[in-house]
Image: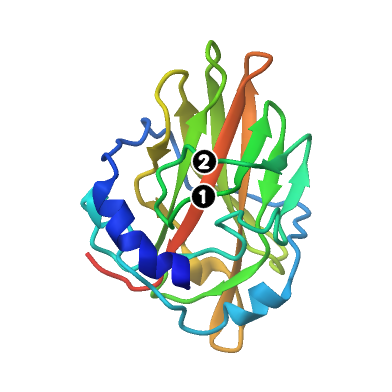
Amino acid sequence: MDRLTKSVAVAFAALACTASPAFADDDYSTEAVSPSWTAASAESCADPDVAPVLSAFKDDGLYAPAPGGAFEDGAAGWQLDGGATVAPAADGLSILGTSSGALDLPVGASATSPTFCVDERFPFFRFTYAQQAADADANLRVEVLYPGLAKDNARKARDLSARRGRGWQLTDRIKLDPLHGLKRGGWRLVALRLTVKDGKPGALVRIDDVLVDPRARL
């Protein structure tokens, strides 16, 4: 967690950003979901090391990265489809320290996180994103998956508009709904899926620093 420790000072120097408007959420569907279970996923079944990495954005909550959510070691267990890749990055918000990698999603691409463990203390998640094409907007769908459930195992959590010229932005708090997940010991299983649903040819949405909030607060 060295990047978390170092990032507090970096975050205070960052400029605050406002998330794009959100649309309807909490739509459940049933589908075949198979996010991978990795060693990092298993390690997540414990209270994580946390830090107030979003203090500069008027959020004093304590956050920890989702498994592989910093994209410093490539995809790190994330399932990439439709042309999704992890590419070098040095122009983000540096929430977790200077970034060397980010998730790239062209139109039609998606990325699904490894399964990870949460409980009722994990109400929200947030991440940074940017539209890198100079002349094209794109729509980013954010979903929470609940592996192991027979039905209602995918939830549309948020639709975001990634607009050209806006630079890197931080989402607002997105509901995780952890108690909907399948119980594993004292934990619940969830995964995240990010998809660029539509946009002009050449549109490219970048994602970095996917964070979960492991302490419920009002």
- Earlier in the chain: of badge 2 and badge 1, it is 2
* Residue 63 visible from this viewpoint: no
Q: Which residue is mark 2?
A: 90
Q: Which residue is mark 1?
A: 99
Q: Residue at x 60, y 65 (%)?
A: 67
| CB within 8 Å, label 2 to label 1 | yes
The amino acid type, in three-letter code, at marker 1 is Ser
> What element does badge 1 sit on?
loop
Q: Nearer the viewer, residue 196 or 209?
A: 209
Indicate the position of residue 63 as horizontal and vertical percent values: 38, 66
Residue 106 vertical position relative to residue 43 in the rendered view, above or below: above
Indicate the position of residue 95 as horizontal and vertical percent values: 39, 53
**25 relative to 182 in the view: left or right:** left
* Residue 88 lies in quadrant: top right
Label 1 crowd bin: few (<14), some (14–19), many (20+), radius 10 Å: many
Indicate the position of residue 69 as horizontal and vertical percent values: 57, 57
Q: Nearer the viewer, residue 13 or 39?
A: 13
Q: Residue at x 34, y 73 (%)?
A: 215
The amino acid type, in three-letter code, at marker 2 is Ala
Q: Residue at x 72, y 41 (%)?
A: 85
**134 relative to 15 in the view: left or right:** right
* Residue 13 visible from this viewpoint: yes
How far apart are labels 2 and 1 at the CA level? 6 Å
Residue 139 vertical position relative to residue 137 in the rendered view, above or below: below
**10 relative to 70 in the view: left or right:** left
Indicate the position of residue 60 as horizontal and vertical percent values: 23, 62
Residue 1 vertical position relative to residue 123 in the rendered view, above or below: below
**204 relative to 76 in the view: left or right:** left
